[in-house]
Image (tube, helix red, strand yellow):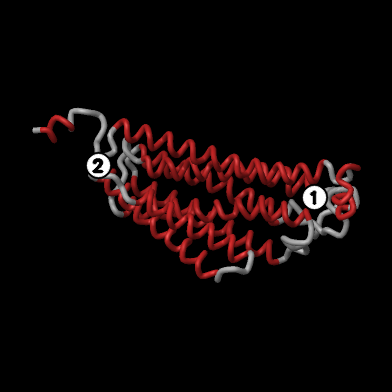
Amino acid sequence: MAEAHAKQHDYHLVDPSPWPFVISVFAFVMAVGAVFWMHGQLTVLVMIAGMLGVVYTMIVWWRDVIREGQQHYHTRVVQLHLRYGMILFIASEVMFFVAWFWAFFDASLFAGEAINYTRAEFTGGHWPPQGIETFDPWHLPLLNTLILLTSGTTLTWAHHALVHGDRQQAKWGLWCTVALGVLFSSLQAYEYSHATFAFSGNIYGATFFMATGFHGFHVIVGTIFLAVCLGRIYAGHFTPTAHFGFEAAAWYWHFVDVVWLFLFTFIYVWGAGTVAAH
């Protein structure tokens, strides 16, 4: 009787999940292991153990969320809060990129400022710094820009097809999007392998690789996110009116697209100066 009464509400109370606590423990082990490893006081295996624990917990936690959705535990209030959670997560990611862009613009706009005399010594007082051979933005970076913009189009195609109940077209759209994501990551790895500057030793390399590399990590995560959605479509999940897992992946992917446009414009084009590598 109590169960029947509970179902009249637009929320559902489930047993407390252990995964928030478990992942916090593994994250702590990973962070502490990384800090002590960098100081040479612990083996790298401690950090790796924590990282593997985080990955495992992410998989089983999201597995449980998917199961709850398939069992119709995601009521209206739960769905609303899932959306709020995804919005706040993307907002936190925005602030990460704000930090990388802040570092880049501070270094590039004030390369020769008198108060930063040490920086001026290493940069030569101009940007790009002396001795840095930058990438030509109109070669691989432009190609990767077109790839990401195209992937946003194919993802919209898949979403439109899913909303209208055309699961076959949704599969094709997602296959194209995942393939374009893999292609982007492959071309970025190829580009990195031909860089004439390193991450360490110069402020240009540090800001360049932190900003573009962090974005590249997001592309890999987004590709995995979309691949999981593709597998769920083959498993019969998602309906035209209930497919938030797909929507969350789409929000994330479009966020990644927008960030890349800023990276391409300011770091590759504006930040390359007047002379680019060929």
Snapshot quadrant of residue 157: top left
In the rendering, at what x and y percent does residue 124 appear? Answer: 90, 52
Q: Quadrant of the N terminus?
A: top left
Mark 2 and mark 1: Cα distance apart in space: 54 Å
Q: Which mark is residue 14?
A: 2
The one nearer the camera, 70 or 2, is 2
Left or right position of 17 against 227: left
Front-most of residues 50 and 145: 50
Residue 122 lies left or right of residue 74; in this view the side is right
- The crowding category of the residue bearing disc 1, from other C-alpha atoms within 10 Å (few below 14, some 14 to 19, many at least 20), is many
Q: Is residue 230 visible?
A: no
Q: Position of residue 272 (x, y in %)?
A: 80, 50
- Could you tell me which secondary element the residue under label 1 belongs to? helix
| Rendering quarter of residue 240 | top left
Q: Which-is-in-front pick, marks 2 and 1?
A: 2
Q: Position of residue 84 (x, y in %)?
A: 43, 34
Q: Residue at x 31, y 44 (%)?
A: 238
Answer left or right for 144 relative to 270. left
Which residue in the structure is indicated by mark 1?
Answer: 272
Q: Residue at x 66, y 52 (%)?
A: 212
Q: Amino acid at mark 1?
A: Ala
For label 2, the SS is loop
Considering only order in the chain, which callout, 1 or 2, is on the residue closer to the N terminus? Answer: 2
104 left or right, relative to 245: right
Residue 166, horizontal then vertical, whole percent: 34, 43
- Nearer to the camera, 66 or 111: 111
Please give the name of the residue rendered at 41% of the width and 39% of the height, measured from the top-left corner: 160
How many residues crowd around disc 2 within 10 Å: few (fewer than 14), some, or many (20 or more)?
A: few
Name above or below for residue 77 compared with residue 224. Answer: above
Outermost residue toward the left in this view: 1
